Amino acid sequence: MKSAFVWVALVLVLAALAAAPFFMQAYGLGLLIGLMGYVTLASAWALFSGRTGYISLATVAFFGIGAYMVAAFNEVLPYPLVLVVAALAGLALALVVGLSTLRLAGVYFVIFTFGLAELVRQLVTWYEINVTGTLGRYIFMSLGPEHIYWQLLALAAATLFITWRIDRSRLGLALRVIADDEVVAAHLGINLARTKLALFALSSVIITLVGAVQAPRWTYIEPAIAFNPTVSFLTLVMALLGGASRLWGPVLGAVPLFLLFEWLSANFPNHYSILLGLLFIAIVFAVPKGIVALVETRFRTNERAFRPVAMEAEGKP
Amino acid sequence: MTATSRRAILRTLGISVCMFAVAAAAPAVSQERTSVKIGYAISKTGPNAGGAGITTLPNYELWVKEVNEAGGLELPDGSRLPIEVVEYDDRSSAEEVVRAIERLATQDEVDFILPPWGTGFNLAVAPLFDRFGYPQLAVSSVTDKAPEFVQRWKRSFWMLGGGSDYTDALAGLLKKTNDEGKINNKVAMISVADGFGIDLVTAARPSFSEAELEVVYDVTYPAGTTDFTSMINEAAGSGADTFVAFSYPPETFAITQQAQVAKFNPKVLYLGVGTGFPNYGADLGPNAEGVMSLGGIDPNNQANTAYRKRHEEVTGRAPDFWGSVVTFASLQMLQEAVKRRGLDREAVSDELSNGTFETVLGEVKLEDNQLRKLWFGGQWQNGNFVAVAPVDREGVSQAIMPKASWQ
């Protein structure tokens, strides 16, 4: 009965969000697009990093690949096929990267993924210079902002649904063991490499699709625009603020942070970076385990944590 | 129960009365307009901040200050309204600049929006300017596709030409000098592997081959390169009299330094962005003499000279010799168009397309929404970066070739 009520509520919220473009001005819709983009990015990031403890800074590598695929194919393929191509490109990159690096652990993985974003950007630049002879690409598509928004909304809902399913599956159980102790997980007969790879690929494909869906908003892309490292950092901070190992954590981190960034940049354009830095420090000190965990410990002081926490912000090096 | 609902009714009534009052007050406010709102989003932080802080932002500030000191923007009826600025930092992010323009248009409801800095960002916001009906005076964007963009976005104006304008002008100058027997027809060319360098080098290859110039050395380097020794040596060994580098400011300065150290004395030295910065000439002194680049000014244009002086007084530094003056001229055009046609954006766009304007560049009339009367090549001569191309335009200086050796 209770779960039925939750489902009805979720469907109503989704319907209300889907109807939002009919009542909003361009700015409000732009805000919702940005918001939904980061909700999806943070949730997809947490799907892998929050559940395995592998902190990835490669978000923008996949995001940028998605944007570039749209730029490269938007004039030769119908739009749905462009998205398929983008997803496949993200998948291919994720498999190559995952196979070669998921044996790295801790800080090595963080550094590698940070380098990966730069590597992909340089490869794209190299390709554009030597093959196409121009760095900028144009995306002239007749997609209105509301279409972009609806796609992102669908993607966000799908991401949350997939995460929910995985948390309740054998895969989810395996992940919790891996996050706690990889050696134990291996002894239990969990195929470490395959489990991590599957999740990494899934998370990467979603991130790629976010880039692909958002790209038509920019009209023009070049590597500096598509591979802006800020995307990786913001995604990570949002997921950590909310609680990266929880289903709703990234959403609860992304929504307030995104609105706060927007408010800061509208009202304190000259002090934005300073305030942002202070805020990051405050988050790490005040809510190291994320908002969801904080709320849970406040309200369930008598109960034992009903679910083991796979990863805390400070839990892994 | 009754009490609560009565209270609720009263509350609702109260709120409605307030809302009516606000709604009734709103038109009265807009009738008594006290200012003209002008908004812009510019890269104050991030990788684009350097360029925006030299070519674009100081000119916006200078213009607003001058207009407001004169009592404000003049309207067709002779009255003046001060400019109220709404400024955002796009943090060099494409998504950010798009949202900032949406905010300016629909939340702040500004009267006019000034464009952001850079080719990419001007293109990113062009569909929005078009959709919300704002004229877009895109200055800091060099693009060969301007004629297409004008078709696509009727209210867009492109003020700095395209890559091939600059390379055609350079090729023409080199061909002429070659015909005079002062230099050979060989060109060594390097370019930065980033937007500007790639666009220019892609335009330069056909320009040079059309002018029967032979490119004997053609390499690209990644942005941020600091050591150019091997490239300079290879260019020196290539037998070319002309060395061209489509470079960004840090590299422009580095190449100049390292060419001196290597005693590399090409007869024509053409470098990229940064050559037209005032401190380039100031730092190098006599060694800047003869170095060429994009842009340039007519030293006898009094309006421009006065503009440069004011710019230095107000912002504390001299403007660059390429985009700055065009940026300021675009603002003067907007000011004049408002004076002639008022605050109706449609009318102002029409005036910008068809009107003739007296600006710091001299008389300006756009052709197909593009500024075509531009200086495409300049050269340092006697501490001034003077225009040397196109050679058939009034006010052009004679290029000094070959360039003197380093001292």
Image: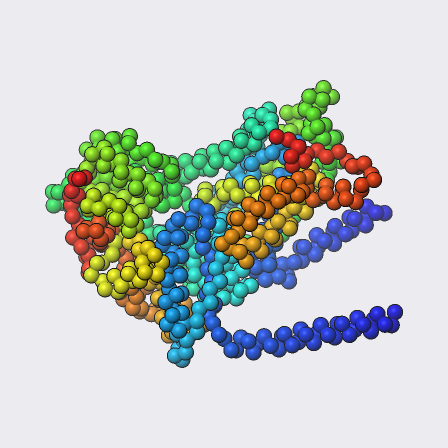
Using the rendered view, name the quadrant where residue B140 is placed.
Answer: bottom left
Q: Measured from the top left, where is residue A308 in percent x and y?
A: 75, 33
Using the rendered view, name the quadrant where residue A309 is placed.
Answer: top right
Using the rendered view, name the quadrant where residue B230 is placed.
Answer: top left
Residue at the limit of the structure toward the top, as seen here = A187
Residue at position x 21%, y 51% in the image: B383
Residue at position x 25%, y 31% in the image: B234
Q: Measured from the top left, where is residue A300 in percent x and y?
A: 80, 42
* Quadrant of the rendering where the N terminus of chain B is positioned: bottom right
The structure's colour scheme is: rainbow
Task: Tell me: residue A94, above or below residue B318.
Answer: above
Residue at position x 45%, y 43% in the image: A224
Viewer-closest of B254 and B121: B254
Residue at the limit of the structure toward the bottom, as seen here = B77
| Residue A69 seen from this side | no
Residue at the limit of the structure toward the left, as seen here = B181
Task: Tell me: residue A251, above or below residue B109.
Answer: above
Q: How many marks?
A: 0
Q: Measured from the top left, where is residue B133 in percent x and y?
A: 48, 65
Residue at position x 62%, y 49% in the image: A257
Q: Measured from the top left, where is residue B22 in percent x and y?
A: 63, 74
Viewer-closest of B248 and B306: B306
**Position of B172 compared to A207: left or right?**
left
Task: Tell me: residue B340, above or below residue A267.
Answer: below
**Position of B289 compared to A43: left or right?**
left
| Residue B180 seen from this side | yes
**Position of A10 compared to A201: left or right?**
right
* Quadrant of the rendering where the C terminus of chain B is positioned: top left
